[in-house]
Image (cartoon, helix red, strand yellow):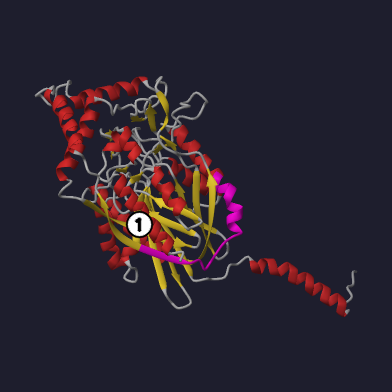
């Protein structure tokens, strides 16, 4: 039989206590201290029913099935400082082509009654710009459905607020590439051929940076990530199925790695001239098809690898009492002026095309029906898109009709009023805008910002098409000419945004 003798040596007792303290302290230090920051998450499914009409091309596409569900994700943030001053935000991201102001205004009215202690001006929405979802017009049945789901997500996120911490991370993943091809004669085409002898390069830059804000509970467990990628989710933009595009794949892979309770608030950075396609290389080097599911899986994989590379450092740099400021401002952006020379040139083009239009609108020889036939024929013989031709008579007609409309209205509408949000959260700044904003504007905001990381969030608070650069307008073509706001307004947007950001760092 074993017998144990009580050790009464003072030095031995001190030694044992020291060991116990060393074993216990690391476990005690794992729990974060409550610094007054509260974060809540929620997500709702906004996947449409069968046979949904997909939005984002000139022509309707009837969905044949659901490749990945569409979601609307809400992140609610609140802080209370030592003087009991509060700051608030509810950010919502939706797998949609865009969010019109009417949708956001309607949501605010609902939230005002559901969350009386929340300042509804501090709520804003953004879209991931998938082209594989229906039109979210708030007056339509689908738009009404999205509105109810958005309200439910915002309310749940607010009610789910818990003590939290944040940490920032910057990784790199090749996702977006400039999609505007430049030629020696000074013209530019979106998705133009790079095999032409006069191809001289791509018009603009690209940005592989992936900005991330990790959100944690006080047990250092990850609750969600705000991710900002400078590329629209448009791999599936011309397909006949519902899809959240590469964001659906990111969510799926992230939950496989962590848990089903991890949320992703997806943001599209300044990317009006970007797409997920490397046009000069084409597919000769063996890149997956960036017009279909293989590309979705590949981009999802690249972004998950980026999260993995940043995650360890992020977990070791958590803040629970970051500076939190949220500014909301309405600004007037000068609308783009169409010159009389441009007007007369466009009028001549429109009249020439319309003069040869058959009187019978159902004739196969109308510009519209010829455009549709060419697109359908291309779908049968071409493995990769784009299958529609924006240099067709119909494409040219549409661009010039927009210019004529802008010319007719420019004296009545000298400014476009828009709401922008700027948030400081620790060393990070978030800055919203309602455009498909060309990447040069985003780089300008980032370079001039005093924040260590700046997340530009396009397609927020409203949807106002492209905001092109002067270089793009000079090159012409669809994605540069169908804009209500041009480079002058773009510079005002940059200056106002930078001022709001940098004022928060004074």
Q: Is residue 458 within the magenta segment? A: no
Q: Is residue 63 visible?
A: no
The answer to whether residue 147 is above or below residue 190 is below
Image location of residue 185, percent across then percent down: 34, 25
Residue position marked by numbered label 1 in the rendering:
496
Q: Which residue is drawn at 69% across and 66% down?
A: 26
Image location of residue 81, percent across then percent down: 47, 74
Relative depth, front residue between 372 and 329: 329
Image location of residue 243, percent across then percent down: 38, 40
Determine the secondary structure under disc 1: helix
Q: What stretch is highlighted in magenta?
A: 306-327
| Picture quadrant of residue 19 | bottom right
The answer to whether residue 429 is above or below residue 352 is below
Mark 1 crowdedness (10 Å alpha carbons): few <14, some 14-19, many ≥20: some
Q: Residue at x 63, y 65 (%)?
A: 30
The answer to whether residue 401 is above or below residue 330 is above
Q: Is residue 84 left or right of residue 132?
A: right
Q: Which residue is drawn at 50% across and 36% down?
A: 298
Q: Is residue 295 left or right of residue 33?
A: left
Name the residue furthest left: 359
Relative depth, front residue between 198 and 130: 198
| Picture quadrant of residue 347 | top left
| Picture quadrant of residue 201 | top left
């Amino acid at each position: 039989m074993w017998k144990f003798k009580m050790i009464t040596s003072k030095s031995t007792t001190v030694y044992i206590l020291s060991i116990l303290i060393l074993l216990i302290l690391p476990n005690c230090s794992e729990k974060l201290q409550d610094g007054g920051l509260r974060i809540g998450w929620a997500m709702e499914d906004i996947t449409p029913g069968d046979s949904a009409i997909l939005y984002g091309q000139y022509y309707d596409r009837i969905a044949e099935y659901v490749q990945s569900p569409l979601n609307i994700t809400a992140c609610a943030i609140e802080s209370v400082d030592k003087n009991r001053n509060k700051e608030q935000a509810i950010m919502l991201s939706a797998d949609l082509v865009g969010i019109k102001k009417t949708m956001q205004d309607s949501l605010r009215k609902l939230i005002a009654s559901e969350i009386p202690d929340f300042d509804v001006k501090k709520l804003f929405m953004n879209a991931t710009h998938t082209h594989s979802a229906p039109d979210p017009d708030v007056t339509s049945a689908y738009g009404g459905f999205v509105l109810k789901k958005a309200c439910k997500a915002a309310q749940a996120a607010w009610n789910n607020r818990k003590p939290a911490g944040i940490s920032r991370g910057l990784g790199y993943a090749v996702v977006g590439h400039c999609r505007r091809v430049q030629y020696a004669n000074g013209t530019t085409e979106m998705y133009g051929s790079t095999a032409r002898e006069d191809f001289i390069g791509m018009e603009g830059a690209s940005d592989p940076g992936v900005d991330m804000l990790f959100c944690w509970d006080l047990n250092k467990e990850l609750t969600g990530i705000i991710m900002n990628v400078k590329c629209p989710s448009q791999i599936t933009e011309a397909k006949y199925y519902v899809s959240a595009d590469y964001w659906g794949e990111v969510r799926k892979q992230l939950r496989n790695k962590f848990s089903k309770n991890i949320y992703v608030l997806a943001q599209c950075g300044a990317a009006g001239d970007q797409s997920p396609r490397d046009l000069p290389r084409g597919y000769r080097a063996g890149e997956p098809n960036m017009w279909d599911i293989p590309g979705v899986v590949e981009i999802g994989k690249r972004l998950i690898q980026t999260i993995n590379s940043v995650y360890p450092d992020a977990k070791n740099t958590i803040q629970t009492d970051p500076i939190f400021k949220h500014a909301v401002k309405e600004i007037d952006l000068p609308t783009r002026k169409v010159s009389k020379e441009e007007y007369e040139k466009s009028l001549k083009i429109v009249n020439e095309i319309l003069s040869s239009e058959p009187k019978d609108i159902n004739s196969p020889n109308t510009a519209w029906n010829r455009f549709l036939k060419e697109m359908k024929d291309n779908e049968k013989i071409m493995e990769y898109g784009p299958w529609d031709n924006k240099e067709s008579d119909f494409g040219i007609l549409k661009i010039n009709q927009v210019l004529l409309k802008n010319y007719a209205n420019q004296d009545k509408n000298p400014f476009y009023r828009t709401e922008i949000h700027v948030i400081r959260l620790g060393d990070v700044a978030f800055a919203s805008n309602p455009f498909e904003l060309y990447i040069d504007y985003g780089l300008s905001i980032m370079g001039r910002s005093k924040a260590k990381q700046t997340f530009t969030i396009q397609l927020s608070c409203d949807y106002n098409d492209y905001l092109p650069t002067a270089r793009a307008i000079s090159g012409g073509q669809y994605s540069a000419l169908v804009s209500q706001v041009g480079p002058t307004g773009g510079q005002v947007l940059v200056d106002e945004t930078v001022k709001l950001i940098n004022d928060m760092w004074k």
